[in-house]
Amino acid sequence: MLRPRHALRDSRLLQFKRIVVSRIARMLRGGFRRRGLTVFTLLTVVAAGYWTAPGAGAADPDATPSTSFWTGSLEDAWSTVSNPPSVAAMTPTGQPDPSFGEFWAAVSRQNPASTVTVEPILTPEPDASVDRADVSPDIGEEPWWRKPVNGYLLNSPNYLQFDVATVLTDTLQSSPRISAISNRTSIAYEKIIQQDAAFDPSVLLETGIDRVNDPVGSTLTTGGPPRLIQDSWNASAGVRKLTRQGTVIDLSQEAGTLTSNSIFFDPAHQGNSRLNLSITQPLMATSGRVYNTRLVTAASIDSRIAWQQLRLDLESHLVETLTAFWRLHERRAHYVQQLSLIERGERIGAIVAARGDFDSGPLQEIKIRRRLASDNDRKIELRAEVQRLQVRLKTLVGSPMLTSLDDSIELIPMAQPDFPEEPMSVRDCIVRGLEHRGDIQAATEQLASAGLEVNVTRNELMPRLDAVFEAYLSGLASNNNIGQSWINQYSDGGPGITAALTYNLPWGRRAAKSRLREARLRYKQRGDELRNALLAARREIETSVIRVRAGADLRRSKAATLAAAVREEDIATRRWEMLAGDGGPTALILEDLLETQKRRTEAEQAYVSAQVNYILELITLQQAMGTFLIREGIEPTRPSCSTSVEILQTSPINERLLPLERWTQPMPVDGVSGSDVFDSGNLEFDAGRSLIAEPQMIELDASKTQMEEPHSEFPEKMPVPYLRRVRAVLGDDVSCRGRCGESVRDDSLEL
C-alpha cells in the first residue's frame, strides 16, 4: 500500500526518537555538560538535515506532517549554535556556507588546542536548466579536465604538444614501415619494365679464330698432303628482335678469312662475307599478342594489386597510429580524473581528522585510508599505461627525434574529442565502400589475372606449328680481302632462300589439358573470392555503421550518467557535512560519500572512453569504406616516367561530395597501342596511361571455345559493375548482361 511521504517520515522519526533516548541513557553516565551539548547538537543537525533533504515532500508537497517538531529553516537550526567567523567553508555550489563555520566554531570551543585548517570541499554543481539526459556535458560547456589533460602531468624533463595533423605528417615522413610499403610497390612497377624489356632488340657480336689439323683418310681431301691444315678467323654482328606477336627476327652479317693447305682450295687465301636473315613465326601455339605479352600483362596486374595493397597497408598503419594517439588522450584524461578523486578523498580525510575529538572516530579514518590506498594503486596503473602508450606512439611515428629521447619526454596530444554526430545511410556507405575498398579492387584484378591464365593455357593446348624463313647473300674474294667479298655478296650471284614448316604435337596433350583445367578452377576460385570480398565488405561496413550509431547513443547515455553522478556526489557531500558520527546509521554516510565520489570518477572516465571510442569507430568506418586516405587528404602518387611511389598529404576531402554511382562505370583504358606505352626504345613508361595498354591484350576469344574434352561453364554470379571492371581489363569479348545487382552468366567463358 502506498503511503504519503510525510507518513513515512513520521515512522522514521519514531525510530529516531528511540535511538536518541538510548544514546542519552548511555551518555548520562559520563560528564553531563559535555554530553548534553553533544546530544543537543546531534538532534539539531539530524532534524535540520532531514527536513531540508531533497525530495522530502515529493509525495504531497502541500501536506503538513502531524509529528513535526521543527518548523524553521536550516540556517535557523544552525543559529542555535554560536557563530564565530574564524573558519570559512564552501558549499558544493561554491558559495560560503555560514552553517559550517558555526559548526566548526562549536567544535573549536570544545577543543581550543585544535589548530587544524579545514579546506573546503568543492563539488561542481550541475546546471539545473540543462537536461543532461538529452545533452552531453561537452555541448555548451567545456569539461573541467580538458585543460589539465592538455597540460604537463608526468614531471618529465621535456614535453611535446602535437595534434592529429602533426602526427600524420611525421608518420608519413619518418615511419620506416611506410617507406617499406612504398618500396615494395615500386618493386612491383619495376617488374613491368623487366618483362617488357623482352621485346627490346638485342645486338649480337661474335668473333673467333680456328685452326684445323686433322689426318687425311682420302687423297680427295687435300690432293696429296697427309694432314689437312686450315686457319680461319670469323666475326659476326647482328640484331635479334622478338615481336609482340611472337615473331623472332634475326639479322646478322658475317665476315672472315680462311687458309688451307689443300691443293683443291682456290683461291688459297680467301676473304668471305655472308648476310643472313631468319624469321620464325608461330602459327598456332605460342602465337598471338595475348600469349606473347602475358608476362607484361601479368606484371601490370600485379602492380595494380600491389597498389591496392599499398593503400590497405597505409590505411592500417595510420589507423593504428591514430588509435594510439586517441588512447593516449583517453588514458591521460583518466589519470587526471583519478588525481582529482584522490584529492577529494584527501580533503575529506582532513575534515575527518579535524572532527576526531568531536564526532569522528578511528573507523572513519581507516575507511578513508583504505580508499585512498586503493585509488593510489589505480593512479599508478594509469601512469604506467600513459607511459606505455607514449612508447607505442613514438614507435609508430618513427621519428628519430622522438625515439632518441626514451622516457625523458612527455607527449601531450592536443585533442578535441567533441566530434559532432554525422548522419549516415547504410546504402551510401556500402556504395562508397564498393567503390573505394582496396581489397575489392585487388580481388577484381586477381580475377582478371585468372582470365589471362585461361587464355594462355588455351593457346598452349593447340599444336606447335611454326613457319621458318631464311635468306642470305654471300661473297668471296682472294688474298683475304674481306672488303671485296662484302661487295661481291651484293654484286655477284643472288640470294639463297629457305622456307619450312615445323610441327610438334605431344601425344594426348595431357599436360596442356591439365593446365587448362587448373586455370579454369583458378578462375572460379578468384570469382568466389571476389564475391566473398563483396560480402565481407558489406558486413564490415554495416557493422561499422551500427557501432558508430551505438557509440553516439552510448556517448549521450554516458553524459546523462555523468550528470547524475555529479548530482549524486553533491547530495552525498551535503549530507555528510551535516551528519557525522562513528556509530549507528550515520556511520554509513561517509562510506556512501566515498562510493559516490568513486562512481563519479568512474562516470567521468566512462564518458571520456565513450567519446574516444566514438571517434575510433568513425575512423574504423572510414577504413571499412576505403575512404580514410581521402578523408585525411593523403594520396599515394607515382610521378611520370618513374617507378618510385610518393605519398602526398593534401587538404582533406569529404568523400560524401564524391558521386555515389561512379563505381558502376568500367575501368578507364586508354585507347593507345602497346608500342606507344611500352616503346622498345624507351625503358620508362607514362604513369598517366593504363598499365594494360589495350583491352585486347587480355581477350577471351569466343571463336576458340571448342575443345576435345567435355564442355564446362563458369557459373559466375557477381554484381554487374565488377564484371564490367573485369571486361575493361579482359576485353570486350566478356559479355555482361542484366541489370545492376542481378546475377549474370558469362557465356564467352565457356571454353
Image (cartoon, rainbow, N blue to C red):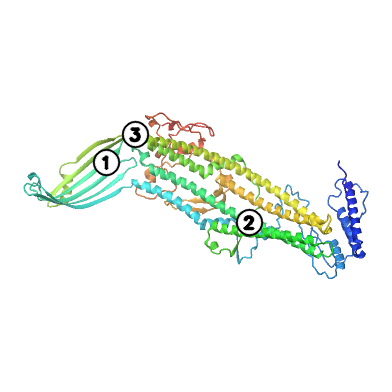
Q: Secondary structure at mark 1?
A: strand
Q: Which label's residue is closer to the chain start, 1 or 3?
A: 1
Q: Which residue is mark 1?
A: 279
Residue ID at (40%, 28%): 710
Q: Is residue 298 visible?
A: yes
Tell me the CA gap for discs 1 and 2: 72 Å
Q: Which residue is mark 3?
A: 509
Q: Secondary structure at mark 2?
A: helix
**In this picture, residue 603 sits left or right of residue 580:** left
Amino acid bearing label 1: Ile
Q: Which label's residue is closer to the chain start, 3 or 2?
A: 2
The nearer-to-camera label among 1 and 2 is 2
Q: Which residue is mark 2?
A: 329
The nearer-to-camera label among 3 and 2 is 3
To which quarter of the image does residue 356 belong?
bottom right
Amino acid bearing label 3: Arg
Viewer-closest of 542 and 269: 542
Residue 127: percent from the left, percent from the top? 77, 53
Residue 564: percent from the left, percent from the top? 75, 51
Q: Is residue 667 visible?
A: no
**Crowdedness near tag 1: few (<14), some (14–19) or many (≥20) residues, C-alpha within 10 Å:** some
